[in-house]
Amino acid sequence: MENIDNILLKIINSKCNKKDYVNNIKYLYNANVLTNDETNLIEKALNYMQIYNNVDLIKLFKELNYDYTDLENIEEFNYSQMLESINNLITTRREVENQNLINESLSLSAQGIYTNKTLDTFFNRYINEIKIEEDNTYKELYSINIKKDEYVSTLNGYIDEITGGLANGSITSIVGARDICKSIWSLNIAYKCLADNKNVLYISLETKKEDIYKRLLSRHSCETKFDNKLTIMELSNEEYLDEYHKVYDDFEKNLLKNIVVFDKDDFNTMSIYNMQMLIAHSNNQFLKRNNNTIDLIVIDGFLNMIIEERNKTITNRNHVINYYYKYLKTQANNLLGFNNQIPIIITMDIRRDAQYLIEHSMGTHDEFNLGFVEDEAITLSDNIYAVYSDFNLRKQQKARYKVLKSAKDIMEESKLGNMDFDHYYIEDNYYNKDIAKLEQEDKELTQSMTDVITSNNVSYSGSQMDLLDLDIFK
């Protein structure tokens, strides 16, 4: 015998006139929310009421061979308590059933399986969240702009040229050491989309939402329409208040409608289910604001994600990558089941063992390779780009970019490109003579440092960032 809900026992034990009792019990019976054992018990209770005009719980349990211990002190409901309890029981059972359907649908959608059942489940679950009125649904679908076969620029003309940029339906992993380069690159790709009137969902798992907006404002201040570029510190400096307000107002007027930002605090629990809620909410916001859907999703600091499901917390990197990447791949190809394709960018640190090698290397960092990336990310990513900067490159406001995987081509050597660390700004990089000259100078500087160390018989195993602290360079 299955466990019988204690509330159901109180409902069966209710005291009211025969007609009300029978009607209420039939109402519960027809709701189809009871287990087999509970259904048998309800049917037996109806028969008893019809024949004897009352129900004896202990006698019922004995006839059904159910355990009837602890039944003597079961509370009796009056009519109003009985009806309220029946309604609450039906609501609770249906919510549980609904959640089980949602979990099943999410599991199927993560495998790229969309059936009528899963789509109906998603729609019913999110109808309040995305607020599509029943009588307007068809009209709204007509006015949604279907995405064209286009790509999002990487802001690096060389990379765009050899890879075709970030195509709709693709997952792009931006990997690198534990620094801010990955975030600056992904933020600027997002900013370019905003400037092109495209909608961006930006999920930051390392940085607070407020700070993401500050970075966007600092980046916005680099536009030629403003007199000065503003750093994060200058945004909150009274001396620059007038300029800050100009940047703030202009961003709000022209770009804010095209971005939704979430941070770690917006996840009640970390799961595909909550990720789906955030995507659905954002999609609805864009439909309200500009009658378009999401054009780009950025997930910055991905390895801060964990899996929280069924009272378990999973932090293993391989499991986390596999779990979310499969789901995000289906969203990139079929956003919310509406046949829209979009690019998704995910930034993450390289493997911990590779991190150690980079931190203790003195090379040109062309050793960045797929061996530095988890196998699951390699398999499930359409593109993998690496970005890196060190002390010397930061002084030049430069970074190194490299393509580790794409459908078209890869790069054997990294290329220098612009990166303004003070203002979170990347110009549209293209590999031209100026960049080539800087790259050659960087190689020569690295070689000269190595030569000096060798000639002075200095044993060194630190990072390039610490080179200038050696006595021979002072």
Image: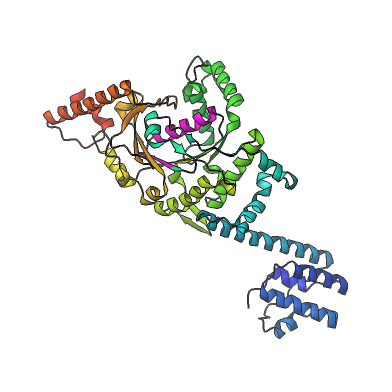
Q: Which residue is located at x 71 percent, y 42 percent? A: 139
Q: How many marks?
A: 0
Between 20 and 59, the residue placed more toward the observer is 20
Can you say which quadrant of the picture contains the C terminus? top left
Asked whether the viewer can see residue 101, the reply is: yes
Residue 464 falls within the magenta-colored stretch: no
Asked whether the viewer can see residue 306, the reply is: no
On screen, residue 474 above or below 303: above
Q: Which residue is located at x 78 percent, y 80 percent? A: 56
Residue 173 falls within the magenta-colored stretch: yes
Can you say which quadrant of the picture contains the N terminus? bottom right
Q: Point out residue 194 in the picture as x, y percentages from the top left corner.
A: 54, 30
Q: Point out residue 401 in the picture as x, y percentages from the top left corner.
A: 35, 33
Q: How is the image coloured?
A: rainbow
Left or right relative to 207: residue 413? left
Q: Residue furthest front?
A: 149
The answer to which quarter of the image holds residue 118 is bottom right
Q: Point out residue 247 in the picture as x, y percentages from the top left corner.
A: 55, 21
On screen, residue 133 above or below 29: above
Between 94 and 78, the residue placed more toward the observer is 94
Left or right relative to 456: residue 274? right
Q: Point out residue 446 in the picture as x, y percentages from the top left corner.
A: 22, 28
On screen, residue 238 above or below 102: above
Q: Which residue is located at x 44 percent, y 24 percent? A: 423
Left or right relative to 245: residue 411? left
Looking at the rendering, the stretch of residues picked out in magenta corresponds to 172-197
Q: Residue furthest top?
A: 227
The answer to which quarter of the image holds residue 405 is top left
Q: Which residue is located at x 54 percent, y 58 percent? A: 108
